[in-house]
Amino acid sequence: MLHTIAGFDRIGEENAFAVLARANELAGQGREIINLGIGQPDFRTPEHIVEAAIKALRDGHHGYTAATGIAPLREAVAADLLRRHGTETDPGNVMIVPGGKVTMFMAILMFGEPGANILYPDPGFPIYRSMIEFTGARPIPVPIREENDFAFSADETLSLITDKTRLLILNSPANPTGGVTPRSEIEKLAAGLDRYPDVAVLSDEIYSQMTYDGMEHVSLLEFQGLRDRLILLDGWSKTYAMTGWRMGFSLWPDALIDKARKLAVNAWSCVNAPAQYAGLAALTGPQDAVGAMVAEFDTRRKVVVEGLNAIEGISCRTPLGAFYAYPNIKNTGWQAKKLAAALLEEAGVAVIGGPDFGVLGEGYIRLSYANSTQNIKTALEKIDSFLKKTTK
């Protein structure tokens, strides 16, 4: 009998991919399935980005690159951060990685061990807790509450820090809730963290360019007092509709960048070379496609919120960022995961049950509005019809 280390018995997964697989299976059987489960833009990658990758292949960029990424791309990331956040960064502290999850993996692996506490948002991206438990560290949920418009509370977050806390994970704009934490709360948190200089911070800002209703994204990069322990996570997947390209970037403090480089050398050597040239074209080329995509998401957001609030038993706060709605389904009488499963199997609509995003997720489901307006309207009609003919 094979034996594996205990950590592999603790590791979880991202159930959105299991739902995607089942949705595809049902579609393959001839069922009409509308997928509002997966967090993936339904737009094509802009053509100039695709062409840059093709040109890179034709120009002979077929080999290894530096583990941290090609120099022009790291320089472009630093320039992009300066443009968007008004903060200068050293390209030498930038790492190009194969997707945003990799930065989570590295950061949690660096700080997670038995006896350590790691704080993470709950509900939040499921890989946070999965990786924390894998390392043997204790996951400490930071509650993300509906009554607070799904923004984190600085006071509540700070109250959870102890002498065992090694890492704090933050996410705004947030998955799965669409919440955006306002500047006042982030400033309060940054000031409070001065009392805990040994706590590292991982700021997941992958949805940084997707905010609505005049809400601003406030990057943790703005706070110089955090820079010597801040790990920034961002990338191309959501902003440029490049999920399948597996392209992310991270910014590391001086004390950690070489550790991150060594992990890269041990794990994946380097990121696909032509994809890096595509990433360079994305950052240095025209940005109009980004604005157009976010504007379309905004239109769909309004359709989703209005439609959900019209369904008996469901209420939905208006998300201020990303491309997710996180409606409250407690008054339907259904448990969240059972409702999500029934909607897929019986109504042909894929959504994700709230508990897949944390222990505080019961009573909610997540819908992605990264799908066409017509599909969203049809899905909402199917959900309404299903709930009207079922009781629980």
Image (cartoon, grey):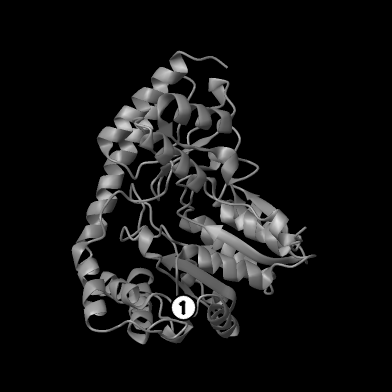
Across and down, in percent, residue 125 comes to 54, 52
Which image quarter is the N terminus in?
Answer: bottom right
| Horizontal side of residue 26 vs 83, given as left or right | right
- The front one of 242 and 363 is 242
Q: Is residue 237 visible?
A: no
From this view, report whether residue 163 is shown above or below residue 140: below
Quarter holding residue 111: bottom right
Residue 356: quadrant of the picture? top right
Q: Is residue 261 above or below residue 297?
A: below
Residue at the outermost right position: 115
Quadrant where the C terminus sits is: top right
Residue positioned 47% across, 39% down in the render: 22
**Residue plotted at (48% across, 48% down):** 17
Instruction: Kindly identify the residue that appears in the image at 43 percent across and 38 percent down.
Output: 25
Out of 392 and 194, give the one closest to the viewer: 392
Q: Position of residue 84 (x, y in %)?
A: 34, 69
> Is 115 left or right of 139, judged from the image as shown?
right
Residue at the front extreme, as displayed: 1
Q: Is residue 200 left or right of residue 50?
A: right
Which image quadrant is residue 378 in? top left
How far across and how far down the image is residue 262, in percent? 57, 83
Query: Which residue does the numbered mark 1 point to in the structure image?
Result: 95
Residue type, numbered disc 1: Met
Is residue 366 depicted above or below 2 in this figure?
A: above
